[in-house]
């Protein structure tokens, strides 16, 4: 699971949880896989993300070095930043570990890079 | 004139055969013969002509008992071996010149006898990636010692299980075939025998795996017995499955979801280690037959009779072993399995029904299901390709991920309720997660686009179908769009039958561009009259259990009789008698029903709704 995917995940499906975001990451196995760098793609993606959650995820993974806490205004023209973003969002993969709901502490296992977000019947929030 | 005058088409056919024959000899070194044999080369019947093993099997099976079918990767031809020469002769005379469509083009099968088994049909020396085969791993004395050490006479509590097709005994933990998992909280009395542990430390010293397994399954196969193609439960066991082979040789078949097929000869006393792709992506199985084609000393191939083979398969439980069992897939005994066969009257019943007749089924048939889903659907591809670069897309119910790699300028996340299907996506390098369409763990108002193909029709109540669509809309940003496909009750429109209704059992239709049709070709190939009889039986048994309306079982290739039903799926392969039949629940939609449902949702509007090959489809935009 990439941090970009993590950026879209929430545990607000649990009964009583409001935001459930961002999920805390406890990783036991992390890999980096090369992905073609496409500055236009990453520039278009960035405004759709919650950068503070990207930063928090990077901290959880011990990979926050060089990752700014917030996005700069001129991010589109900042090549260094775009490359950092490309790496942390697309190349870092969490293979094994857990995601943790920030409100309840409920853990979701990540196995083989796949987070299992299924809930037990009694945990599901009423809609 | 005495000799019969050939018709124009006969002359054409003869020309074609002689040309194909020359091609085979020139390029493939396959010598064909005029003499009748039990082996047929089927030109134009190969994988690149859009055919599959199932299709070939379905076509040839009616003419006699098939010993083996070999699909050769990236070739226009395949091989069919009959047990009896007379059946091969019959099949050749009936099917030679058989025409079928591959896309827009019509092709004809050219079938000739081959005198000798070509090298490609024997076991290959090529192995699937990640597969390690160590010959002569143990001496004959130890082989004897291990074989004598198994006590087959003890009861189930001692790990002995009797299966229809082979004898099985477990050590450490029982592998439960009913849930395809182990229960880590219930270790068996008998752990892995110490003689084996010594061997496992030896394996460890080789540096291929870095753990000592804690679960052992001993399988004993009589000649003629086999095991259906499968992948060992991914989340239950670590990477690195080890199998020690004792007694007879055997040829193990490895199959890739894309159709590649490798036959690997497993000699006695060898150790087979499955890692990475060979463990997670390729399925493996043993064709039930009494002999194998194996390489002979002169470089040719020869037929070798199988004897009794005993395999010791060592596995290491993962942290997540048993997770579905404890968490989301409650264990049900067989009696209970049949209890839910009437339409659910409340949410609780609906969840139960879907768990048994949707989720568990997909988990079990994942690999087979995936192998029947290759071609993305044109109108869905078009929708995905029309999204601007940098869009973020969710594919809810993504199956094997065939839509996740369509547009590389779109960031796609797939979600499926089946861990096995999500795994297949993951091994295709796609982002995937396991979640339920009723509660999607994705941020609200955040996705540019969402697709949900062939999912909503698996929900068993109106409320749940509405709830699911509400979930899809919830994750969209305002202005974002969702495309939904559901199966239609109406399989005929404007007097035009949908492709699957038109599909003739005797025709080899290789066109694969419809979800429904794919599903049907897979089903049709597998179901014979005997199975339909079984289905009926299930049906009548079930009708005893509930007072409310029972859910019927759909008969393949016919129009739907009602909106709620079970659609059977039979696991291959046909040569295994009593192969498992699974029943998936479907609610097919009437014309207008999908629109009516969507109109109940206040924060979206309908952009477009249409009919596409037996499906109702809709594009919604969030307000």
Image: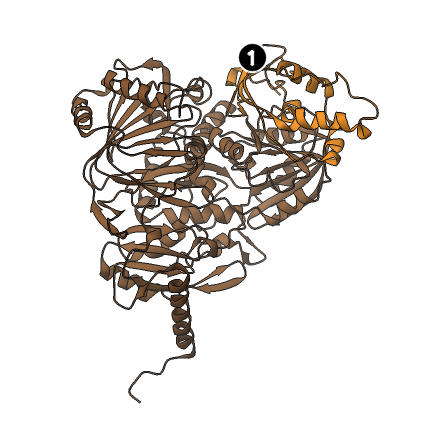
Chain colours: A orange, B brown
**Which residue appears at 31% of the width and 66% of the height?**
B93
Between B104 and B318, the one lying in front of the other is B318
Please identify the quadrant where the C terminus of chain B is shown.
Answer: top right
The chain holding disc 1 is A
**Which residue appears at 61% of the width and 23% of the height?**
B441
Residue B195 in view of the camera: yes
Q: Is residue B487 left or right of residue B251?
A: right
Q: Which secondary structure, mark 1? A: loop
- Image-quadrant location for residue B253: top left
Relative to B201, say whether B288 is above or below: below
Relative to A29, say whether B138 is above or below: below
Residue B456, percent across and down? 56, 35
**Which residue appears at 76% of the width and 26% of the height?**
A80
Q: Is residue B165 left or right of residue B121?
A: left
Relative to B166, say whether A29 is above or below: above
Residue B457, percent across and down? 54, 37
């Amino acid at each position: 699971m990439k941090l970009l995917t993590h950026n879209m995940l929430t545990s607000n499906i649990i009964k009583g949880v409001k935001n459930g975001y961002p999920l805390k990451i406890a990783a036991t196995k992390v890999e980096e896989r090369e992905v073609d760098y496409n500055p236009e793609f990453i520039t278009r993606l960035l405004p759709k993300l919650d950068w503070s959650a990207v930063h928090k995820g990077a901290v959880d993974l011990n990979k926050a070095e060089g990752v700014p806490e917030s996005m700069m205004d001129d991010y589109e023209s900042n090549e260094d930043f775009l490359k950092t973003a490309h790496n942390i969002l697309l190349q870092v993969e969490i293979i094994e570990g857990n995601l943790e709901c920030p409100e309840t502490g409920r853990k979701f296992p990540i196995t083989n890079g796949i987070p299992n977000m299924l809930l037990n019947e009694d945990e599901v929030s009423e809609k | 004139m005495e000799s019969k005058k050939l018709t124009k088409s006969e002359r054409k056919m003869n020309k074609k055969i002689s040309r194909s024959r020359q091609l085979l000899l020139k390029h493939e070194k396959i010598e064909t013969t005029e003499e009748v044999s039990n082996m047929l080369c089927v030109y134009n019947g190969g994988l690149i002509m859009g055919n599959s093993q199932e299709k070939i099997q379905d076509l040839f099976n009616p003419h006699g008992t098939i010993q083996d079918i070999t699909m050769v990767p990236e070739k226009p031809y395949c091989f069919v071996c009959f047990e009896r020469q007379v059946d091969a002769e019959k099949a050749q005379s009936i099917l030679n010149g058989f025409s079928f469509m591959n896309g827009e083009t019509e092709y004809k099968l050219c079938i000739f006898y081959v005198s000798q088994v070509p090298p490609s049909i024997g076991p290959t020396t090529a192995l699937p990636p990640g597969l390690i085969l160590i010959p002569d791993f143990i001496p004959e004395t130890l082989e004897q010692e291990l074989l004598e050490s198994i006590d087959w006479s003890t009861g189930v509590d001692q790990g002995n299980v009797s299966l229809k097709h082979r004898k099985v005994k477990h050590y450490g933990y029982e592998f439960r075939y009913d849930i395809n998992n182990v229960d880590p909280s219930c270790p068996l009395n008998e752990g892995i025998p110490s003689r084996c542990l010594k061997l496992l430390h030896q394996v460890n010293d080789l540096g291929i795996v870095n753990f000592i397994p804690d679960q052992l399954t001993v399988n004993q196969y009589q000649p003629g017995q086999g095991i259906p193609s499968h992948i060992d439960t991914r989340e239950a066991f670590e990477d690195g499955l080890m199998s020690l082979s004792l007694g007879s040789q055997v040829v193990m078949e490895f199959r890739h979801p894309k159709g590649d097929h490798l036959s690997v000869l497993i000699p006695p006393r060898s150790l087979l280690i499955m890692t990475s792709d060979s463990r997670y992506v390729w399925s493996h199985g043993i064709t039930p037959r009494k002999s194998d084609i194996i390489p002979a000393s002169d470089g040719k191939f020869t037929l070798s009779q199988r004897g009794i083979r005993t395999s010791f398969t060592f596995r290491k439980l993962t942290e997540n072993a048993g997770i579905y069992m404890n968490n989301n897939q409650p264990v049900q005994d067989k009696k209970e399995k049949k209890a839910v066969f009437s339409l659910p009257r409340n949410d609780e019943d609906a969840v139960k029904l879907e768990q048994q007749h949707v989720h568990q089924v997909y988990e079990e048939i994942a690999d087979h299901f995936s192998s029947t889903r290759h071609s993305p659907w044109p109108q869905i591809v078009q929708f995905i390709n029309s999204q601007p670069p940098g869009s973020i897309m969710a594919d809810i119910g993504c199956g094997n991920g065939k839509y996740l790699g369509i547009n590389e300028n779109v960031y796609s996340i797939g979600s499926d309720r089946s861990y096995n299907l999500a795994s297949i996506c993951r091994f295709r390098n796609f982002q995937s997660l396991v979640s339920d369409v009723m509660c999607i763990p994705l941020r609200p108002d955040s996705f540019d686009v969402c697709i949900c193909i062939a999912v909503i029709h698996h929900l068993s109540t109106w409320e749940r179908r509405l709830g699911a669509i509400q979930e899809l809309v919830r994750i969209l940003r305002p202005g974002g769009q969702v495309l939904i496909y559901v199966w239609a009750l109406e399989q005929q429109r404007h007097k035009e039958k949908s492709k699957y209704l038109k599909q003739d059992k005797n025709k080899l239709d290789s066109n694969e561009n419809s979800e429904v049709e794919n599903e049907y070709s897979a089903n049709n190939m597998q179901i014979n009259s005997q199975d339909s009889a079984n289905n009926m039986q299930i049906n009548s048994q079930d009708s005893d259990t509930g007072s409310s309306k029972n859910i019927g079982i759909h008969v393949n290739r016919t129009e739907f009789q009602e909106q709620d039903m079970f659609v059977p799926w039979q696991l291959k392969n046909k040569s295994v008698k009593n192969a498992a039949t699974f029943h998936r629940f479907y609610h097919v939609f009437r014309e207008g029903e999908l629109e009516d449902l969507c109109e109940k949702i206040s924060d979206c509007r309908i952009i477009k709704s249409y009919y596409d090959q037996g499906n109702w489809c809709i594009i919604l935009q969030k307000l």
